[in-house]
Image (spheres, grey):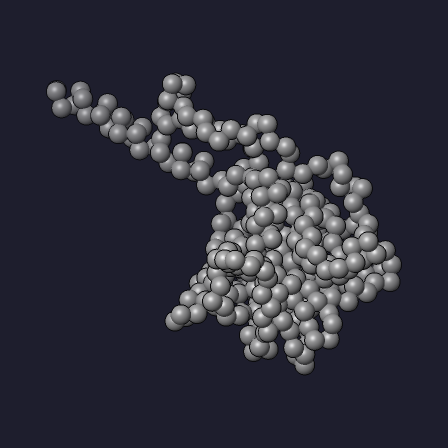
Amino acid sequence: MFFNRYLIPICLTITTIAIAPVEVTAARRETRAILAREVGSIAKKTVVRIESAEGTFGSGVIIGRVERGNKNIYTILTAAHVVRSTDTKYKIITPIPVNSLGVRKRTVIDVNIKNIKRIPNVDLAEISFESNHIFAIGTLGNSEYADEGSPVYVAGFPKPGQAINRIAFQFTGGMISSRLDESDLNPKEMNNGYDISYTNITRAGMSGGPVFDAAGRIVAIHGQGDRNNQVPGEEASTGLGSEEKTGFNLGIPIQTLFRIQPHTRNLVGARVDASPVNYQLLDRSLTIGTNNKKFARRFRTRADAPPIFDVTKVDEQTYD
């Protein structure tokens, strides 16, 4: 009788203890949204400019690094139409190295044509280069969580305009306006992988630049700007287009890259964080196995932080 009376309560207690940590672990899988200027800092450390000998140019982002001997081999992800020509030379202008001492400046690196890999059936390409410097690497996110209304940021180096008459890094905010993933059902309608659209300001020269989510992870590669009469690749280095832009721009989701090239992480040394975004600027308290407030711990409170971006200004930012 002694054995039977106490066996069941003991088992229940053990089960309760085992379940509680699982719930906390699941909650921690979300990645906290960060401020726009923090995402901008990530972008400035990872985005590159790509120029051709023909005078065209675009953008790209460093997504991986592997070590071979004493050399660092970096991989840039960009739009394939930025490096479409096989008869010209390309060079990349890197971000400022994180291990830079003394003079802090960007580095110009000539690209060997054999180091450009065009990814089949989609407007994406990878460029590899060697360097003794240490550059920051962008983290690849999960584009499936970038649904309509999600805040996103686009970064790159647009061609000079009337007022901004030199090439300068630009970082713009907006939101996902549409998901066009239904086109995956028919490969003939895939539009080179451009299955996601957003409201960010973009200009020619920003093609190949990254689209970041609110946690600073790359969820797409920018490459098209919609126009009333679309000219294919108008967001490429030429900037040609017959009519004004509609305000919608398009990118290729990172999940498309993973479907075509599932071993990207191992191939190029990429960092991947596929967790959803927690948009709460106030970190919630964690309670383990109890509702008693005495055991709750609050940390990194940011209730007074400004909003991630001002959605009221999006409609005003539709023209170049």
Residue 216 in the image, given as x and y percentages of width and height: 57, 47
Residue 230 in the image, given as x and y percentages of width and height: 81, 61
Taking the spot 83% from the left edge, 63% from the top edge, the residue there is 241
Q: Quadrant of the N terminus?
A: top left
Which one is in front, 221 or 63?
Answer: 63
Position above or below: 105 against 319: below
Position above or below: 120 against 193: below
Taking the spot 58% from the left edge, 43% from the top edge, the residue there is 38
Residue 147 in the image, given as x and y percentages of width and height: 63, 45
Which one is in front, 243 or 238?
Answer: 238
The answer to which quarter of the image holds residue 306 is top right
Taking the spot 60% from the left edge, 58% from the top edge, the residue there is 47
Q: Taking 244 as reference, is 193 left or right?
A: left
Q: Taking 2 as reference, is 114 left or right?
A: right
The single residue placed furthest to the left in the displayed view is 2
- Residue 113 seen: yes
The single residue placed furthest to the front in the displayed view is 102
Position above or below: 274 against 184: above
Residue 95 in the image, given as x and y percentages of width and height: 58, 59
Which one is in front, 294 or 182?
Answer: 294
Q: Taking 69 as reference, is 207 left or right?
A: right
The answer to which quarter of the image holds residue 25 is top left
The answer to which quarter of the image holds residue 88 is bottom right
- Residue 144 seen: no
Position above or below: 113 against 36: below
Taking the spot 64% from the left edge, 73% from the top edge, the residue there is 90
